Amino acid sequence: MISKRHLFLKKARMKKMRFKNALKRRILSALLLGTFILTSGCTHGSTVGNAGSTVFKFGGQNISFGEVYIYAETVIEGYKETYGENVFSMDITDEDGNARTLEEVAREDIIEDIVRVKVLNEKAKDYDVELTNDDKAKALGEADEFWKGLTDSQIQEMNLTQDMIQKVIVENIIADKVYQEIIDTYDVEISDEKARETTFYDMYFACYKENSDGSVAKYSDEARQQQYDNAVEAYGKLNSSSGTSNIEAIVSEYGLAKSAYYTMTPDEILASYGTEVSEMLYDLEDGTYSLVTETEYGYHIFYMKYLTDRDATDARKEELLMAAKEEFFQDKFDGWLKSTDRSFDYEKDVDFKEYNKISFE
């Protein structure tokens, strides 16, 4: 089995993508965050449904097939434009640790989005939210854009109307305005320490190799000693050169394929390298090297680029801020959801015979 550390660093290389989390938390949260722009123009297999038929009921409202279709078309195209045509066949891990296809997750997220929009529209009066002339113009423009992107067969099969499309957009605009009103009341600050992202280079002299079956074979004592000698020699070369320009040359010289820059939080560094290495790293100053450092996986020379990477830290601070505001909102929303429709259940209340007529292919 591949070592925990190596798996962790593989994930760290893909950190900016945050692929699993991004997908399972709906990449098109823009539906509720003020950037809802309907798109269409692609057909996704044989979708044959009646726009007026009911897919589910919520809060006394019949949610029509046509309304669900409008949401689904937008989500489907957004996923495919971002991750490719075959994205919905991918398996991901949901929040409960269960393996599911992305299509299963996306279908549930679409219904959750619609429910959220309906609940927030119910709260519009409580927050004095009304449509402005600009909002109305935006809704008209986006409805027209979506309408023009539909094929003749989509319009005929779905019996869609511009009024239906405009209604969906208007409800999303109102939902977004209510959401912003709520989270703007929550005053929270995220410190640099809490949001810290550290960027460093790990010049890594591995003392194990991965077999084709994924198992790990440790180096012999003799081979491990050679890696240590290489690390000491490389350390001497680093300290005899000016700046960091020699790092890549040395890495190439010794064939250190697993060496790389990483940007990690303190918790990620601790989970990857352990307490001793973590404490050592945070004792370094920007632009300095560690001594040759031994771990169970081999030998390392660390170069500290940014103890606090300003850009990465600011980006994470924004993520944490939005997460805190979303949690604040969710506490309120959960109560509103129960009061609007206490019994609604995705698995029990959605007519999947109708819903599944929308193809994600």
Image (cartoon, rainbow, N blue to C red):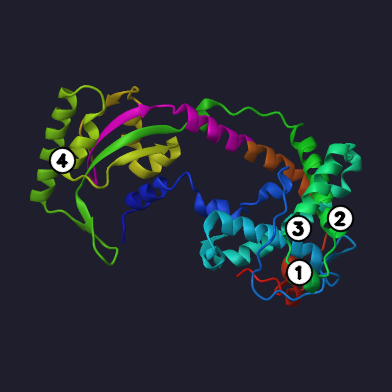
| Secondary structure at numbered mark 3 | helix
- Residue 260 at x, y = what percent? 31, 41
Estimate how packed mark 4 is, as few (under 14), some (14 to 19) or many (20 or more) residues with alpha carbons within 10 Å.
Answer: few
Gap in angstroms between the C-alphas marked 3 and 1: 10 Å
Residue 310 sits inside the magenta stretch: yes
Kind of residue at disc 1:
Asp
The residue pinned by badge 4 equals 253
Question: Is tag 2's residue or tag 4's residue first in the polypeptide sequence?
Answer: 4
CB atoms of marks 1 and 4 within 8 Å: no
The residue pinned by badge 3 equals 148
Q: From this viewpoint, is residue 354 visible? A: yes
Of the two numbered discs 1 and 2 in the rendering, the one whose residue sits closer to the viewer: 1
Residue 40 image-quadrant placement: bottom right
Gap in angstroms between the C-alphas marked 2 and 3: 35 Å
The residue pinned by badge 1 equals 152
Estimate how packed mark 2 is, as few (under 14), some (14 to 19) or many (20 or more) residues with alpha carbons within 10 Å.
Answer: some
Does 354 appear above or below 79? below
Kind of residue at disc 2:
Thr
